Image: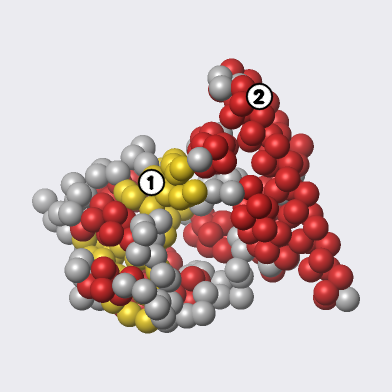
Amino acid sequence: MIHKLVSVVVTTKNNTATLDACLESIVKKQTYPNIELVVVDNFSTDDTQDIARRYTKKVYEKGPERSVQRNYAVEKASGEYVVIIDSDMVLAPEVIAQCVDAIQAPGVTGVVIPEESFGQGFWAQCKKLERSFYVGVSYMEAARFFPKKIYQEVGGYDVNMVSGEDWDLSQRIEAKGKLSRCAAYIYHNEGHISLWKTVRKKYYYAQKFSSYQQHNNNQQKSAQQTSIVGRYLLFLRRPGKLFKNPFLGLGVLFMKTCEFGFGGAGLIAAKLHRK
């Protein structure tokens, strides 16, 4: 059996806390036998590059944003397939093998890998519960595994986007065929989340979101992705799951209310700035 080369792209910047576990899950723990690791670092000032070189010779520097890094990494990749991974993620051992199997189906141009969060503290547990509601929801997930040829054909990530770029690429890939999914998970290390850090991040990315929304091919899904009512309904339609632990359930609703509030403020601030 021929195992086609898969290039796993990881972008980094000062990620010593999570990078080792990420790269080990790619290089040492995957069941698929033919994997190439490509790391593109955004000029880290810590030991990030030293850690990366323990796992691959393909370590490069590029910036200023992750979309530029990812596109550059794909240029350097030799694989027939590419998969885009963040440096705070850990892959289940079957992820790459299942993605390769899924991409073989007729018409499939991208594969969605489900995600599960983990971390320390109450808000990290809330984030884990929140993300669990998005698994299998087509407008909330984005594909990460693609044929390199299709990735390059659609132009890769839009380097003018800082927010929504994963959804944007996934939707352009889907327009070329259809998306499939694998069953094995990516585990996303949220670390120690504070509510204040979370809402500040939401405010920042909301200010950058208009470049994603303005693309015609994104408008239908962006309306679903930004719908406050739709998001609450995702949670409230499964009350047994949401309130299995009442404190966590209420925490999710409170956190999302705060995020929507700060996100709305960010959108307004961006509109005022453009004027």
Quadrant of residue 92 in the image? top left
Residue 223 is marked as none
The three-letter code of the residue at mark 2 reads Arg
Q: Looking at the image, how many numbered discs can be counted on the residues? A: 2
Q: Position of residue 207 (x, y in %)?
A: 72, 65
Residue 141 pos. (x, y %):
53, 47
Q: Residue at x 41, y 70 (%)?
A: 14
Q: Residue at x 71, y 59 (%)?
A: 203
Residue where numbered disc 2 is placed? 237
Judging by the rendered image, the residue that carries numbered circle 1 is 186
- Please tell me whether mark 2 sits on a helix, a strand or a loop: loop
> Which badge, 1 or 2, comes first in the chain's sequence?
1
Secondary structure at numbered mark 1: strand
- Judged left or right of residue 202, residue 192 is left
Camera-side residue of 163 and 171: 163
- For the C terminus, the quadrant is bottom right
Q: Is residue 218 above or below residue 113?
A: below
In the rendering, at what x and y percent does residue 163 appear?
A: 62, 63
Q: Amino acid at mark 1?
A: Ile
- Side (left or right) of 254 relative to 73: right
Question: Crowding at label 2, few (<14), some or many (≥20) Cα neighbours within 10 Å?
Answer: few
Quadrant hosting residue 197? bottom right
